Each structure stands twice: as C-alpha cells, then as structure tokens.
Amino acid sequence: MSKRGKYGQWSEADLALAVNAVRSATFGLNEAARRYNVPKATLRRHMTGQNKGPPLVKSFGRTPVFTKAMEKELESHILKFEERMFGLTIKDVRKLAFDVARMHGLRHFHEEKPEAVSEATGGDISCQDEGLQQRKSRRIFNLLERLVDKHELNGTRIYNMDESGFTTVQKKSQKVLGLKGKHQVGAASSGERGVNTTVVCCVSAAGSYIPPMFIFKRKRYAPELERGAPAGSEIVISDTGYITSELFIQWLHHFKDNAVCLKENPVLLLLDGHTTHSKNLEALFFARDNGIIMLQLPSHTTHRMQPLDVAFFRPLGLYYIQAQETFLRQHIGKPVTQYDVVTLLAEAYGRAATVGTAENAFKAAGIWPVNRHVFRDHDFAPSDALRQTSDVNTISVPPTPGSFSESLNKASPVPQITAGPSNQRKQQNAEVITSTPYKENLEMQKSKANEKLLAKSRRAVFADATTVSNSKKKKMVSDSDESDEDVDFEASGLSSGGEDFVSSEDFVGTDDFKDFNRNELQANDYVLIVQKKSTAGFIEISFMRKSTKIKNAFVFPAVPDVSEVDDCDIKMKLRNPQKHGQTKRQQSYISFGIEFNMNVR
C-alpha cells in the first residue's frame, strides 16, 4: 500500500484511460491500475458505477450533501443576514442546512421528503438606524476638504473631541489561568454596581493630546478627587456624571488654553452631535471668537468616522480594567472608589495616549490625510439594506417553486424592512456648527421655543364663573360644606396694599363695583376678578386658589398661576390682606375680612 501522503498522484485523464483500457479488454483491472497509477478500488468503483460522486471525476473524502450551486446560494443567503446586521451563528447555519436538506430529501439527513414543513416568518427591520451611508460620507468629506483647503489646515490643527464613561467596577474581567476541569473561575471585583465617571478626551491628527477633563457624579466637590491627576487636567462635578452645556463651555476654555487657536490661524474640532455641543449658543459664540471651527459628524457614523472611537477608547478601557485589577490585588478587601478613579485612569491614559495611536486613528477614519475612499462598498452594505428605498424591497424576483432558494427562504426568511414610526427623530447631518447660517438657524429655534414657553406660562387656567360645571366645581372645592361660593379663583398681586380691614360681617355686593377707577390700580394690589369676554387692555395677574380648610381664605398655589386678564374683568380693589397663625404654613393662608358669598354676573 502506498504511504500516506502519496494519495492522489493520478489525474482524471489517467482515470479515463484506465477505464477505457479495461472496457476495451486491452488490459485487465490490475494491469490498468498499475500502468495508469490509479488505485484499484477507485478504478473498480468507476467501472461498476458504484462511485457516489460524479463519474470519472477525481474527489476525496465524503461526498458533500450540497452541490456547488447549492453551496453558493447558501453563502449568498448567509451574507444577506449579515448585511442587515442579523448575522447567523454556526449553530444557526447548521440548523438551516439540516432543514433545507430534509426538505429536499437529501441523504445523510432524510430519505424522503416530509409531508409538511413549518414555515417561519422573517423579522422586521426598523429604519431608525441607517448607519454609515454614502450620502453622509460624501457630505462630511466635502465639508472637510473645503475647510482644509480654505484655512490650509494640517495635522497639528485638526482635533477630535469625545467623551467616554468609566465606572468604579470593572466591566469585564480578563482571562486568567486556573485548574483544568474547574467549572467556575472566580475573580475579585470592586462591587456589583459602580459609579460612572465621564472622561473628556481630545487629540490632534499629529498625536498632540489635550489634558483630559474628569466629570464626577457628585453634589459637592472634594479635593481628594484630584489625587494622581495628569498634569493640566480638569476635575469637575455634575449631578449626573455626564457632560452638560455649562461644562462643555468650561472645556472649551480648557481647550483654548492648551491649543494654539487664533482667529487668524484657526483649528478644526470634530465632535458628535450631542445637544451640549450642537445646541449650545454660548459655546458657538466662544468658538467663533477664538478661532475654533467646530465640525459636527453625522448621526450613527461616529463608530467609523470619529478617531477617538475608532482606535483610542477601546485600549484605554482595557488598560483601565488592568489597572483596576492590579489595584484590587495590591489592596485586598478595599474597593475602588471615586477617589481612586483618577489615579487608575491616569495610568491607563499614559499607556493609551501614544502618537502612533492618534495617527492611526485619524488615518483609519479618513480624516487626516483626508481620504474619502477609505470606506469600501461593504461598509455601506448595512445602511443600504436598512434604507426604505433599498433594492431588496423595490426589486425582488420571487424564487422558483420547489427550488433550493425557496427552501432557504422558508426555513430562514430574510428580515424585511418596515417603515419607522411617524415621530422618528430627525437625523443630524454633517454641519459646520460655528458657521453663520447654522448659528442664525439655532437662534431662531431658541427664540421660537422661548415664545412658546412664555405663551404657555401666560395661558389662563382659571375657570369662568358663568360656565364652570358642577362637576368641575367639586374638583376645585373638595369640601362643599365649608364654602358655597360661585367664584373659585380670585386674583391678587404679590404683596399687600390697600386700605384697612373691615369686619368679617361685611360682604361684597354689586354696589361696590360702581365708580371704580381702574387707572388708580398699582402694581402688587389685590383685586377681584369676574371674567367676561371683552376687547380691552390686558393686565398680568397672579391668581390665588380658595382654601378648603379656612373659610374665605386664599393661598398661592405651589406652581405660580400667572396669566393676562382683561382690565374690564377687574371689578374692585380689595383691602389690605390678613394672614393666619404664626407658622410659615399657616401664614400662607390670606383673608380679606370680606364674605365672598354673592353670585356675580
């Protein structure tokens, strides 16, 4: 027998010659096998038609279940799932192959076709996240090339700024050596749940790093937080531990102090579209005045186009985990606290912040050197598959009934695209947010928003005494036995004024409305309102709510009820108010020494 490794020294031509020689009786089986160097067993199978594969075709090993064409269709089907970001695992592919082979009654799986095969339904793809698109890529690179040419920028004047969160508990422990066969290998952890700390990093395309800013989730600042901080870094606090509009402005001052940026020699700062950056008018004014051109990256593209996300934050996170585990080994029983975070992050930052990392990050994102062709067609495949106008929805050829493609679609339907919700958030495009058109548009949006808030605060919320239903009166006055008044809200100023008190037996009647001079009204006077439709001038009023505990007493609501009323609705000027009790809560109730038990019309 030939030695292992010398198998397959014959060709398909040798096999054909040997078969013809035996069939023509030129040679016997043994002589033909010897002359043409074809194994005797192989020659016998092809002579008798017992070969499982195609006749006179050289093949080794077990015969595949699927043909080459079937394997090609299966490969295309798997890639469709990957393009839609629903990639199949090895287990999924094995099950899919088994189901399809059983449908076609292929050997090694099932001898006969099953009578009925259950059909699965494909999942739906939401179009909310379209990811990296060619349209977005073209726009950002058009803006980038225009800015580089206009201001003659180079690697030392192009920066990228971004934030990342780090907790006091390591996210994922590293792999360690242990006893073989042991089912669980433990590792020390700082706790079950950590406190987040945000780190604001910035680097140039030439590898120049701006000292980071650390944002702690705290109410009060503690000097111990600065322990081990890198030189020149900023330590600040916020209620949430995340960056705010005010902190971003503070960071811009920090950036200006560490980077050479002038109006005559501006720098380019790339950042994401977070509202603290893109909707911050004060930050835009500061950047324009100090030669900082801020370029906003499109939404859902920062994982590919933001250098810090591409190549910096991942090694920084790994080095931080290593520093945490080293700390826990050296301080047994002591957890990592906020006072240790800066020291550990400074150690990780020193290892991650290298010139090579920065240069490779900007190069991989195509930012510097500017390379609009850095992304290939397969990088845009997920967004093309998720777009509503994608070819998979508009142009589709149904598979032939009973074909292999139909069986694939039955066993594993390709997820189809569905339209997103009508209130879908508008995606952000690449913009130079320090440009004049963007600034003016943002100012107009802010002005409209302020007008809406002002109009809402001035909207009247009191009920008209002539149209209030009985059910609404019961909601306004919970205890009907204490008060039978028809007027549920009375208007007042914000401080006392007027004349002396009258006795509690006095009451307000229609005669008191006669000869009332509205021109004598002053700011902070208390007045009585009876709302009626009119077209006269308006006066801003702060309304009080009738008390259900003290008769003929009133109290200011927790949320100020401020609105404008027609000056013709003011029926009289009330007298000097009287407060009840000694405590602050008791004095919040105000009376006027008047019985408001009339029906005003």
Image: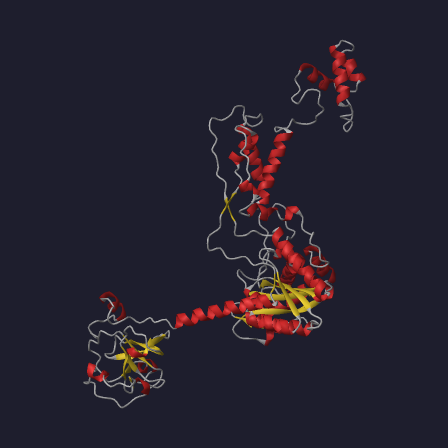
Residue found at the far front of this picture: 535
**Residue 166 location in percent, x, y?**
59, 63
Question: Based on the displayed image, in which of its 4 quarters is residue 371 positioned?
Answer: bottom right
- The residue closer to the viewer here, 480 or 466, is 466
- The residue closer to the viewer here, 214 or 72, is 72
**Residue 277 location in percent, x, y?**
58, 66
At a point 54% along the width and 63% down the height, the residue shown is 194
Q: How many marks?
A: 0
From the image, which quarter does the C terminus lie in? Answer: bottom left
> Is 37 situated left or right of 73 in this image?
right
**Residue 198 location in percent, x, y?**
58, 66
In this view, 557 is above or below 159? below
In this view, 388 is above or below 247? above
In this view, 135 is above or below 17? below
Residue found at the far top of this picture: 25
Question: Based on the displayed image, in which of its 4 quarters is residue 512 positioned?
Answer: bottom left
> Is 598 situated left or right of 579 in this image?
left
- Judge whether residue 332 can be spotted in this image: yes
**Residue 94 location in percent, x, y?**
58, 36
- Judge whether residue 182 can be spotted in this image: no
Question: Based on the displayed image, in which of its 4 quarters is residue 50 positioned?
Answer: top right
Residue found at the far right of this picture: 35
- The residue closer to the viewer here, 256 or 47, is 256
At a point 60% along the width and 34% down the height, the residue shown is 73
- The residue closer to the viewer here, 483 or 380, is 380
At a point 66% along the width and 57% down the height, the residue shown is 141
From the image, which quarter does the N terminus lie in? Answer: top right
At a point 60% along the width and 41% down the height, the residue shown is 79
